[in-house]
Image: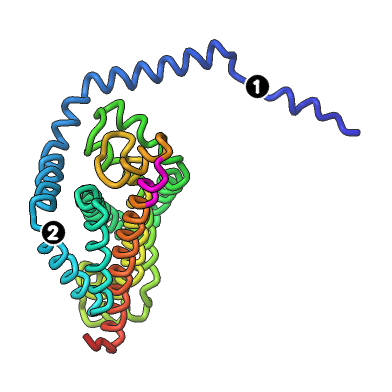
Amino acid sequence: MSDKSWLTEIPQLDRSELRDIRKYLDGAYRDFSREYGDLIESFFDPLLSFLIWFEKLLLGTPWWLVIVVIAFLSYMAGRSWKLAAGVVVSFLLIGYFGMWDNTMRTLSIITVCTLLAIGIGIPIGIAMARSDRVQSIVTPTLDIMQTMPAFVYLIPVVMLLGIGKIPGVIAVIIYAIPPVIRLTNLGIRLVNKEVLEAATAYGASSSQRLFGVQLPLAMPTIMAGVNQTIMMALAMVVIASMIGVKGLGQPVLQSITNQYFTLGLLNGLAIVALAIIFDRVSQSYAKRTQAHLGGRDNG
């Protein structure tokens, strides 16, 4: 038998040393929070004001008008009356079972998170596609973001900003943004090199190739990333409710702690309905965009 005693000889930190390191790091972060917490919080004040305004807008608008607008946007995205009818039926059922207000709160925060994730993620994906060095730096960061347990995101954010909408938005964006970054990078890199060479031969500049050739051709792949980002943002709804984000997640969390089966089931189904609506709308738009690029747009 081979001697495996070396397995037990791995050098380890002494417990007191490990405790000292933890105390030092905790103290350093606590000091940072006290020193810069108010400044960072004031930086997010415009976003908080917009979130509050958007939520009040959805809650204050007559329910029938909200449904008409969402159904119209769904039809414009997919050019499908079936999709628009499905949206109308889903929201009527949500209102009938008394979940309208929470659904509007969830819809507001998911919409804002998705727009922010797209606004931040697509430029990063473009930078990755245009530079191998940027890709080598960003890719490990995305790996960490996608493998880190969602609850871990909440610890530093809550310590820095407390509980409320903004910490929830930050946690949702960190969790949901990797797909749109990865698929933007992938979509641009998969654009046919011969098409780019032809554009260059016609005198197109770097920015003209990007906006006139690469992004349009990569749009179906980018939309797949947007779709995944929306799904992951909705998956964070219940977790975000633990730090004070109002919406469909709070009744689900309440049903878990108090064993209210029906309450959790109905609100869970409302989250599923939102996920299906976002999924079908984004997929329909991506398919229509692809058909248009292929010269088969029948819309």
Position of the N terminus by quadrant: top right
Q: Image point 22% across, 38% down: which residue?
A: 166
Between 272 and 168, the one lying in front of the other is 272
Position of the C terminus by quadrant: bottom left
Residue 130 shows up from this direction: no
Q: Residues within 10 Å of mark 1 (few under 14, many from 20)?
A: few
Left or right of 160: which side holds 151?
A: right
Q: How many marks?
A: 2
Q: Image point 15% across, 35% down: which residue?
A: 43
**Segment tinted magenta in the rendering:** 260-265
The label on residue 11 is 1
Kindly identify the amino acid type of the residue bearing the numbered disc 2. Trp
Element at label 1? loop
- Residue 264 painted magenta: yes
The label on residue 63 is 2
Q: Image point 13% across, 68% down: which residue?
A: 68
Residue 77 x %, y %? 22, 73
- Residue 96 painted magenta: no
Residue 5: quadrant of the picture? top right
Extreme-right residue of the structure = 1
Whole-number angstrom distance, CA of label 2 to CA of label 1: 64 Å
Residue 42 x %, y %? 13, 31
Between 35 and 194, the one lying in front of the other is 35
Residue 280 x %, y %? 32, 69
Residue 201 x %, y %? 26, 81
Q: Residues within 10 Å of mark 2 (few under 14, many from 20)?
A: some
Element at label 2? helix
Secondary structure character of the magenta stretch overall: helix
Residue 16: quadrant of the picture? top right
Between 246 and 149, the one lying in front of the other is 246
Left or right of 173: which side holds 36?
A: left
